[in-house]
Image: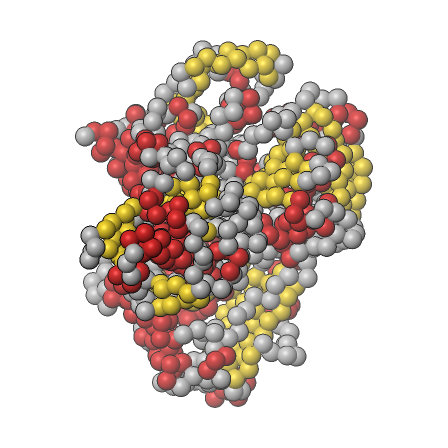
Amino acid sequence: MANFSLKVNGETKEVDVDPSTPMLWVLRDHLKLVGTKFGCGIAQCGACTVHLGDNAVRSCQLPVSAVGEQSITTIEGLSENGDHPVQKAWIEEDVYQCGYCQAGQIMNASAFLKQNPNPTDTEIENAMNGNICRCGTYTRIKKAIKNASSISNA
Amino acid sequence: MTLIKTTYNRRSFLKSGTLAGGGMILGFSWLASCKPTPEQVSNIPKEWFDINSFLKIGDNGMVTIMSPNPEIGQNVKTSMPMIVADELGVDWKNVIVEQAPLNTDIFQRQLAGGSQSIRVGWSGLRMAGATARHMLVAAAAEAWQVDEAEITVNAGVISHAASNNSAGFGEMASKAATLPVPEEVKLKETSNFDIIGTDRRNVDGPNIVTGKPLFGIDIQEEGMMIAMIVHPPAFGMTYKSMNADDIKTMPGIKDVFPIEVYKEDTEKQWSDAGAINKLVAIVGESTWQCMQAKKALNVTWEETSALESTEGHDEALTKLLNTSSKQPARKDGNVASAFKKADKVIERTYSAPFLAHNTMEPMNFYADVTAERALFNGPIQTPEFLEKTLSSRLGMPLEKIDIKMSRMGGGFGRRLYGTFGVEAAVISQRMQTPIKLVYTREDDMTQGTYRPTYKVKYKAGLDKDGNLIAWHVKGAGSNDDLLFENRFPAGAVDNYLAEKFSLETNVTTGAWRAPRSNFVAGAEQAFLDEVAETAGKDPIEFRLELFDRAIKNPVGEPEKNDYDPVRYAGVLKLVRDKASWYGSQKNGTARGVSAYYCHNSYVAQILDLSTDTESPKVDKVWCAVDCGIVINPMAAKNQIEGGIIDGIGHATYSEMTFKDGKPQHKNYDTYRLIRHKEAPKEIESFFVDNGIDPTGLGEPSLPPIIGALANALYKATGQRHYNQPFITEKSVIG
């Protein structure tokens, strides 16, 4: 066990955990931020996607010891009032069915749009291909990302 | 005018002590589970009045509606309250939805399965709203001393024009709550619905996009431990011994022990199918610590029955299809002599592998069992059956067991089988502490309860004019005999024979979204395409001829035929026209059609593959649906789109195989699910507007799309696809 000081959603958090513990479980079990989801544990489904700095990363493969000074943003910290353009677009398109994978989809989409504010359909598909939605909301996710892109650029 | 007796499930309309404290409820329990909008916060009522078990009305006119059924992503948490709200006559923006707990005394069929929530719930939900409206009107009539019949209700306002009186629901709620429940209530004319039939966004949407703790796996309670299980690596093996002492000393680990999920005398329910009875339980402080312990655990397993393999299953199914059934499932005319007379005979065999459900939220359940009572919370499609099993297993009366239903991160049938709830109970009871049982993805994918593996052989005979004169189908599946022998084309062919067989295996199976239909529809619709081609007929015309036969002169006793050929033909004609089947087709596309009936609903689909890409890609799907009245078109379309993507994905990419009893795919690195790039570019849905009472929609769009895909693939590649997953055959999609 070791102490780590983490910057999560703009706040400093202290945890005492095994250094190998993935951020996914630090967030969920220790910081009680359960919006970040467990899907596969091997970086194949994208349900656990968070932002490390400005980049979308798989928190199930990110040991707490590797985070250091970098800031982490989870779905709970994406916006103060749930009004990030991607969140608004998700509501507008009524994207979700079960909703379980959507935090990961939203975190991946929001990081992607920051890098590419006007993506083509193919760019969206490529960027989102690592995020599985078992309910099959892919066509709505694509629409929502385009919609978010236009909200951001408006 | 539709009058409806309120005596149906009358207990729902009695004042319930479970949900209310007398006639009036004080409290804001919904705040805990649902962040109110700023508007709602300023509108929080000071008092709530309990009108019936489905709804309570605040003194300011806000209405809380209980959603009775489990939510697995089929959106009943929005659509069921919409039905209550419409009959009540409230403005939807003043409605707060709460998930009801399991309460068999006041709610009926709290189950998510078979696409039946709306169909079965329809009358009861309407009645709940209408009864409350009636009581509010009666309260107003008494207050104003006017005739009830002259009172109108609109968007939460009760009015009497002649006396110029009007009041909000909140003003009459207190009085209404004290009135007797009427014996009979008038339902709205369907033409007067103003919430039903309109697009309403998912009530949990704002909570989903902000990561609120909605799901079972999100549950955190004071003093709660994490529990994990270890199950045998192969079907046919059971637990023998382990190195528990080495594990117990690992950081954070509280205990490691074998459990017996069911005792010999446990009274099991159908929902207990697929259980693995002996498991190892690991209990610890955190999930990661339990995962580490799981890796270090060394279990000795022993063989108790045959260790089966995919090749063996395949051979055994083929063997079954080469035998004859002594008692055919259905027999009309004489297929043998018809085949002799036939001008052309065509025979094809289709197959599909086992499939895992792969809900994105792995199985999990929260349990807090003490000697006095047992509390549960988690994702379960069959809470009522789980409660019965728990009662028997724990030796505790039903009244001492409480089950709350969390939102589910997918179901697809997997969460009908609540053995994980029993496992959680047994672990909590032993530990004397609340626990949350969590499966890893590997546990989830290799535990079993799979969609059975199937094989079906079709043989059709055509006369010289291309008329279908004989149809012989033989179906077989693992622990399941596959066929719906009285569905189309039964009733449309003079000589018809259906034979079905079940292969006993120790690989456990269960319902998987649109059971049986999820395979047989694709096979049958692909075969029909080939038969139509052999007959030299257009595939839609060929099907319409058959429906016409079933309409005008059905074969066999008409009531035996389990479909309505008029509605069936209706969706096919609708999709034909919407996709301009006979019109111009987009350049560089290949097209396939399919139609199917299941879960009381009719679906026809046309699928275009783009052929100018490196490999065929689904360009567009047109989908026509007859599910009667559509409650929430926006959500209904979401279900349709999901079913289509799910069907294309599983038929194309997914399979579970076995070697020496061991599942060969354990996680998404080798078990392929459809991804963004492979999804159709566009899906357009159309509904038949016929005012018939609503039927299922969670499943019916999945089965036929596999046939439409196979038929389009043939047009695109010249190759017929008989064996799922199609990806393993020559051509590749996406």
Q: Image point 56% across, 79% down: which residue? A: B330
Q: Which residue is farthest front?
A: B145
Nearer-the-camera pick, B706 or A23: A23
Q: Is residue B302 visible?
A: yes
Q: Residue at x 23, y 60 (%)?
A: B585
Q: How many numbered discs?
A: 0
Seen in the image, is A109 located left or right of residue B408?
Answer: left
For residue B59, above or below residue B622: above
- Between B554 and B589, the one lying in front of the other is B554
Where residue B310 appears, x then y in whole percent? 63, 54
Instruction: Give the image location of residue B109, x and y in percent.
Output: 53, 57
Image location (x, y in percent) of residue B238: 76, 45
Where does the image place residue A117, in percent across and percent down from the top left? 25, 29
Residue B441, above or below B65: above
Q: Residue at x 31, y 75 (%)?
A: B541
Q: Residue at x 74, y 28 (%)?
A: B255
